[in-house]
Amino acid sequence: MKKTFRHSLLGYALLGVGLILLVLTRAPELSAINAILGSLILLAGVIPAIHYFQIAPTDRSTIPLLPLAGVFYGLFFGASVFVVRLLWVPDEGRYIHYNPKTTLAVSTEAQFLVLAGIGLMYAGYYFFRANMSRHSPQFRLPKIQDDRWTDIVVGGLVIAQLIYFYIPSVQQLPSVGQFVVPAGYLAFGYFYVRWRKKQLKPFVAVPVLLIAFPLVIIKLITSGYLSPLILTGLLFVVLEMAIGGRIRWLPLLMLPIILLLAYPPMMVIRTYIWDSSKNLNTAEKLSYSAKFFLDYYVLEGVEENLHRPGTGKLSFSKNPINYRGLAIRTSHIVLLANVMDASPKRVPYWRGETYVPLFTHFIPRVIWPEKPQERTGNAFGQRYGFLDNTDYKMSLNLPWITEMYANFGTIGVFCGMTLVGILLAFLETAFCRPKVPALQLVAGAVVVLPFFYQESNFSLVAGSFIPLVVCIWIYFYVAARVPFERLLDAIHRR
């Protein structure tokens, strides 16, 4: 206990020194008060993570949902203040965003609101844990008695995900991806946990973890999106922490390193591999991406005519791609500040409109083919001028706290963030209890982990939650009813 306390004290001390350095070395255009408030938001965000590791592994939630949510707000609303400098245009004396005509700013009002929101999220969480967790239902998967049959059943999810990723016609089937994609990660997580516990035979581990899983990673890389790749890595870091009781720092630190190395070149790679006229297959996309990274970071650079005509070869050493795109992607505090500045003076509150899809999102498109597509991200960008009024394709992320303000103002943030804290506590209690079987552990992680990443509007994250839980339960319920032993006996008798 004393050792844990000393480690926590050391962590706070190092964090405090780091925050002071951030404030002292801030960009000239960032005011001292904005820098201090950004540091406080970052500090408030990481407190639950430090506290989490003070709890004995046998007593804490298997998935640190609140600590992860806190870190999300600390980084995207606190630390992001210090990278907003990349959006600053000195000649014009302003920040720029997706739409060059949009003027952005960092406001103290928005930062105080985020601090209050984080505090209320924590209050809601601990209120539920203290008063209601004992009465919370617990999600339990139907138990399959034979581990061999469990491996076969879970292996079916691996095959289903590979089919979905590699056969385009299957991707066109309505609602299939909403189950198959997360269920595939459930399967890989399950086999990983079994392998770590030395319970998986080599003839299962090799095809699943050394062949099938790399094939999935290849599809993630060639999709042009980095978030699914990073979140997949985080899933395995969390599972490793759940089964080992301690954090593996090397894999965790590799995630931001991969992001920082991959993000700038990926912005250029996307323009090539997303070009429908080229009709590239997966192998061609992977080959082009690998060659680009090698040329950019190691060799002499990438030919200019593919990307930046007139600038010469593009290389990391001579003509690096800047991190402005990453700054735009992560500086959610400036979005909130501008929404607060615009509403309700120039832009009226949405008054719950963005939450309406929650009431229809759970209906599978196979049942309702004409179900309206959710385009809240584009509507948000258009409404507040972050997107050009002719751009109806790009979708802008609408973080939960910003969505709350855009709908109901300050009172919406106060009530909404309290409810978010209660929701996180409920999910942890129902799905992430300690000392559960491997399949239960991974299933809980897969269904609740998206709730920490509160970057997209609420209905987009929560809308598919109930259908996914129901489908996973039905799948394993049916599997548990199969008389596997009798089938084996019948086969042997033949």
Image (tube, helix red, strand yellow):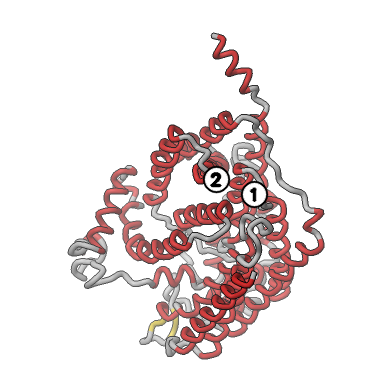
Instruction: Looking at the picture, tell me which residue is in the foreground, 57 or 157.
Output: 57
- Residue 368, how many percent across, how many down? 63, 40
Residue ID at (69%, 58%): 59
Residue ID at (43%, 87%): 25
Question: Taking the image as drawn, is residue 371 in sight?
Answer: yes
- Residue 89, how many percent across, how many down? 39, 82
- Residue 153, how many percent across, how many down? 56, 32
Tag 1: amino acid = Phe
Q: Report the mark closest to the observer, 1 or 2.
A: 2
Q: Which tag, 1 or 2, sits closer to the chain's start?
A: 2
Mark seen at residue 465: 1
Residue ID at (64%, 51%): 463
Q: Is residue 451 above or below residue 3?
A: above
- Residue 51, how many percent across, how many down? 63, 69
User: If the image is split into quadrants, where does the N terminus sit?
Assistant: bottom right
SS state under label 1:
helix
